[in-house]
Image (spheres, helix red, strand yellow):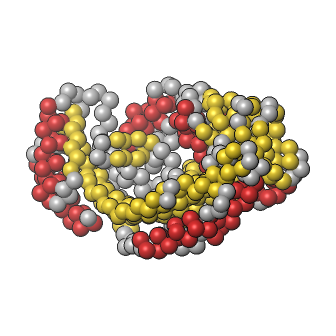
Amino acid sequence: MIEVIDVLDKVIKLGESLGAEEVFIYGKEHTVMSYEILVGNISSRISTTVGAQIIVSIGKRHGSSYTTDVSEEGLLRALSDAISIARASSEDPEWPGVPNFSEKYEEVKDVEYDIESASRAVQELYKSLLKDNRLVYNVGYEGTIEKTFIANSYGAEIITTEYGNGLTAYLSVQTSQGASPGIWDYIVSKEQIVDSSALLENLEFLAKKAESLIKARDMTVPTIWHPSALMSILTYGFLPAIKGDAIHKKSSRYLEKFGESIFSKSLTIYDDPTRKDLVNYVPYDADGVRTKRIDIVKAGTLINSIWNYHWASLEGRETTGHATRNPRPGEYGINVHNISIEFGRRSLDDLISEISEGVYILSLQGAHSTNPESGRFSVMANPAFYIKDGEIVGCLLGASITSSVDDVLNKFKEATSDYKEGFRSTLPWALIDNIRILSRV
């Protein structure tokens, strides 16, 4: 697909000759390799999808067209369709035009994934996790390669390659009291994963603890939040309120709070897509804007929001380089690339060892129902583990939390030096103090 860059200039110039004042092209080639054992059934696939979106401006009118044919002929047909749509459209007084950046950048990497290596990693992990008292629901591997090209009337020509791998496992332990909640964990890596020993060790530890099931009771205790649980509340309750579209529409609860200390002074949140060693390395956003580290919360003070070109233009601001696009349905939005919380100096074991009574939260069931405007949520902490005298002693049943994202971030006390990469995140474990746990059993 990368050879298509050779014809982009021709497509753009033809568009301008046909009456388009601006032309913007965003294309993507997405390859997925997966291997999975789901309740004993094996499936695998390798698939590639290719497509490009062409957007044109004619004054305050604009049109868009998508094509899966990224040859010169296919792009020219999509260009013609986009121009026809723009001419037939009504004027949009808020249309700021296409992103008007002009950088040239090329970072192409030939990446190949070995399905045989992926299958071995999955099968070895699956066999190692199988025990008489367990049901291993799923062990899966997925590798993705995403090649993107961006070009516009202002001279931008950007080609990037992003890639990453994930290995996950999900199981339940059978006990005399019944089955434990589902226990899961994952590894995400830039390179193909061939060694699953760290994931196996952690899952074995949790499965052993889950052999003891403890009914939750009402209590207010210190809690340890797994990176997955942290990402859930950030995704559904925090990020929607710092995005430029929410600020422009005045639906963000933080409208008057930028520059104020509203969270724990121990908390610093930032987005950093610039590290090449991490899976979330993203040199340019989907508008063709070079990315950089952005501090969002600094020592408890909310200091920055995130923007793409469109919403920033409407507010008279500069974009922060957080545009995202899905060309097939024409989706255009704002999102972080690699959200992080500043790491601490102590390990997860260190934090747990100091808790006389508390809860270790791996995941939040129902976090997607968080109210994006208020940040309030009511979720099951599932799975969650009971901590007693500095040790994890069993798996909790029926533990729920009703609170708000802002309250959780206010009670943030300490992050670990350990961290876990996820897609769009690199997060530590976090000690959140004085969380109210309610029993639902």
Q: In this view, does 92 lie to the left or right of 338?
A: left
Residue 416 percent across, percent down from the top left:
74, 56
> From the image, which quarter does the C terminus lie in?
top right
Q: Which of 391 and 337 is in front in this view?
A: 391
Question: Do we see residue 260 in this rendering?
Answer: no
Tell me where residue 114 appears, x and y as whole percent.
42, 73
Q: Is residue 344 left or right of residue 332?
A: right
Q: How many numbered circles are shown?
A: 0
* Residue closer to the observer: 419 or 91: 419
- Vertical relation: 323 (above or below) 155: above
State which quadrant residue 421 falls in: bottom right
Residue drawn 80% across the image and 31% down it: 218
Say if residue 302 shows up in the picture: yes
Which residue is nearer to you in this view: 115 or 1?
115
Place of residue 63 in the rendered image (x, y in percent of width and height, measured from the top left): 21, 38
- Look at 12% across and 45% down and name the residue there: 80
Q: Position of residue 366 (x, y in %)?
A: 58, 35
Please tell me which residue lies in front, 53 or 368. 368
162 vs 274, left or right, is left
Residue at 56 percent across and 71 percent down: it is 124
Quadrant, the N terminus: bottom left
Q: In this view, does 196 lie above or below 382?
A: below
- Residue depicted at 65% across the width and 62% down the height: 131
